Image (cartoon, grey):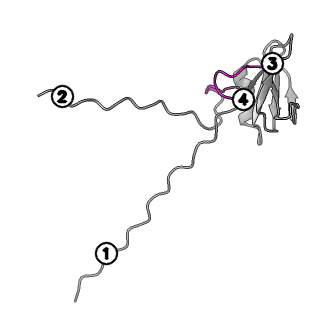
Amino acid sequence: PPPPPSPPPSAPPTPCGCDADAPWDPPGGAGAAQGACRTADGGFGNYTEYRGYGNLTECKALCCDTPGCVAIEFTADSGKCEIHTDNVTRTEDVSGYDHNCYVPPPPCPPPPSPPPPSPPPSPPPP
């Protein structure tokens, strides 16, 4: 007899949680335009600027270690890493600068709750 059909391949898991080694997307998702981080009203929002970061992964790690970080803006040529704490919803192209805004993957969902314990067995009748 022929072998049973194999199950369809499952989709790769969606990244979740703050992982500096995972891919991060710009606001708007994969394929959205890169640029400087901007809030919904086009402002800069609250952020803290750090200098001397050699690569994007180091900047992402700083975000993961910073409570309230919702986005980063990394500029490779200057080693600038901005840690944003206001909701960043879009990017803006800033002529002459290579700003790149990224948001971390969403938090991982909590694990499922364990089932309630089974009631103890009834004692045998006398």
Does label 2 or label 1 sit earlier along the sequence?
2
Magenta segment main secondary structure:
loop
Towards the viewer: 112 or 11: 11
Q: Left or right: where does residue 60 sit relative to residue 78? A: left
Disc 1 residue crowd, few under 14, some 14–19, many 20+, Cα 10 Å: few
Q: CA distance from mark 2 to mark 4?
A: 46 Å
Relative image position of residue 86 (x, y in whole percent) = 82, 39
User: In x, y percent, where is residue 92?
Assistant: 82, 22
Estimate the spatial distance between the alpha carbons at disc 4 and disc 1, rounded to whole Å. Answer: 55 Å
Residue at 87% over, 28% down: 49
Identify the mark at residue 27; answer none if there is no mark: 4
Q: Residue 3: which numbered mark, if any? A: 2
Point 35% across, 74% down: residue:
120
Q: Would you call the spot at circle 4 few (<14 residues within 10 Å), some (14-19), or many (20 or more)?
A: many
Position of 126 with respect to 86 (left or right) is left
Reading the image, the residue beneath label 3 is 99
Tag shown at residue 121 = 1
Q: Nearer the viewer, mark 4 or mark 3?
A: 4
Q: Quadrant of residue 56?
A: top right
Q: CA–CA distance between discs 3 and 1?
A: 65 Å
Quarter in which the C terminus is drawn: bottom left
**Which mark is first along the chain, 4 or 2?**
2
Q: Amino acid at mark 2?
A: Pro
Of residues 124 and 12, the one nearer the viewer is 12
Q: Is residue 110 left or right of residue 89?
A: left
Residue situated furthest bottom in the rendering: 126
Q: Earlier in the sequence, mark 4 or mark 3?
A: 4
Q: Secondary structure at mark 1?
A: loop
**Is residue 8 in the magenta section?**
no
Question: Mark 2 and mark 1: span between their CA atoms?
Answer: 43 Å
At 85% from the left edge and 22% from the top edge, which residue is drawn? 51
